């Protein structure tokens, strides 16, 4: 049986899906060459019901989802923190992506990167984007085991004590993060301690800084996750308004003035579309 790493929160071959526990998440695995290097790309299976959208507002990149999507994101962050195979990345693309719920601009694929596993240079991102949606066959289904996240959530104080004892908060290298759209792809990159902290925070939205939003970095605020309980309803309204105003342009990003027209036609709330 192939193992991508030997950690307790590791990735191993997928057995019977029905028998997996609540902290075991099946994903597809693909190997591809990006910018001359071999990468392992993990991606949630198409059967996952969570949906994600992206947009940029107030100079911040947003991942928009619902409560279940935030929980899934937390699992992916946590699992990624324990990967050991060089150049392993997680890719979220179609069919989990939906249009931006404010103006129906197409959402960007999302890539989660563990900084300690090697860089994902811009040229590699460009190569990856050219292959999304991923059409090359999966090499198999593997399981992300995130039991450690459940233990951390069961005793958050103990988790925080362990992390503080490790001292990474005082190590600038272990706090570095990169959140930006590169060649049409939203890259969310951080070292293992930050990924683990994100995993816990995504799983506890009731403690977020706002009722439905949490920054992935502070004070830079270049990345944020936002929960919209009516995400799919918003997407439907925005898509209908966009098609009425700008028929046949659903696959292209609109200009700022055009986005505001869609927003105003699809909702009575103040504008919060992309920049």
Image (cartoon, rainbow, N blue to C red):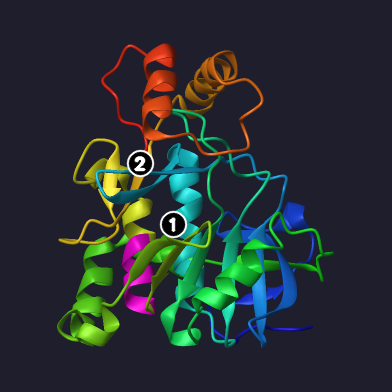
Callout 2: helix, strand or loop? Answer: strand
* Residue 37 versus residue 250 in the image, above or below: below
Q: Is residue 193 magenta?
A: yes
The image shows residue 173 at horizontal and vertical percentages of 26, 86
Which residue is identified by label 1?
Answer: 74
Residue 92: x %, y % from top left: 59, 55
Q: What residue would you read off at disc 2?
A: 226
Residue 46 visible within the image = yes
For image coordinates 69% across by 83% down, the residue present is 3
Total labels: the figure holds: 2
Which quadrant does the C terminus fall into?
A: top left
Element type where label 1 sits in the image: helix
Give yes or no for contact between labels 2 and 1 (Cβ–Cβ under 8 Å). no
Q: In which quarter of the image is residue 58?
A: top left
Q: What stretch is highlighted in magenta?
A: 192-198
Callout 1: 10 Å neighbours few (<14), some, many (20+)?
A: many
Q: Main secondary structure of the magenta part?
A: helix
Please identify the quarter of the rendering in which residue 139 is found: bottom right
Taking the image as shown, residue 181 lies to the left or right of residue 47, namely left
Spatial CA distance of label 2 from label 1 is 13 Å
On screen, residue 190 versus residue 107, left or right, reads left
Quadrant showing the N terminus: bottom right
Image location of residue 8, percent across then percent down: 53, 79
Neighbour class for label 2 at 10 Å: few (<14), some, many (≥20)?
A: many
């Amino acid at each position: 049986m192939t193992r991508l790493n030997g950690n307790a929160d590791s990735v191993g071959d997928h057995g019977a899906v029905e028998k997996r526990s609540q902290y075991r998440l099946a994903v597809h695995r693909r190997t591809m060459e990006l910018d001359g290097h071999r990468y392992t790309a993990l991606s949630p299976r198409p059967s996952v019901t969570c949906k994600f959208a992206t947009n940029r507002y107030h100079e911040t990149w947003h991942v928009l989802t619902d409560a279940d999507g935030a929980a899934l994101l937390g699992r992916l962050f946590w699992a990624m923190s324990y990967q050991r195979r060089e150049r392993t990345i997680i890719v979220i693309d179609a069919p989990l992506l939906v249009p931006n719920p404010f103006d129906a601009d197409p959402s960007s694929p999302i890539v989660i990167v563990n900084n300690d596993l090697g860089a994902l240079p811009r040229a590699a991102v460009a190569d990856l984007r050219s292959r999304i949606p991923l059409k090359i066959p999966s090499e198999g289904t593997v399981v992300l085991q995130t039991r450690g996240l459940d233990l951390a959530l069961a005793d958050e104080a103990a988790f925080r004590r362990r992390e503080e004892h490790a001292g990474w908060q005082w190590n600038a290298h272990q706090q570095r993060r990169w959140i930006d759209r590169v060649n049409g792809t939203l890259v969310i990159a951080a070292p293992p301690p930050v990924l683990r902290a994100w995993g816990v925070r995504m799983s506890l939205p009731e403690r977020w800084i706002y009722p439905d939003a949490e920054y992935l970095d502070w004070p830079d605020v270049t990345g944020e996750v936002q929960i919209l309980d009516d995400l799919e309803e918003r997407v439907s309204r925005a898509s209908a308004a966009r098609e009425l105003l700008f028929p046949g342009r659903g696959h292209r990003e609109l200009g700022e003035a055009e986005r505001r027209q869609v927003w105003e036609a699809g909702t009575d709330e103040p504008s919060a579309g992309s920049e």
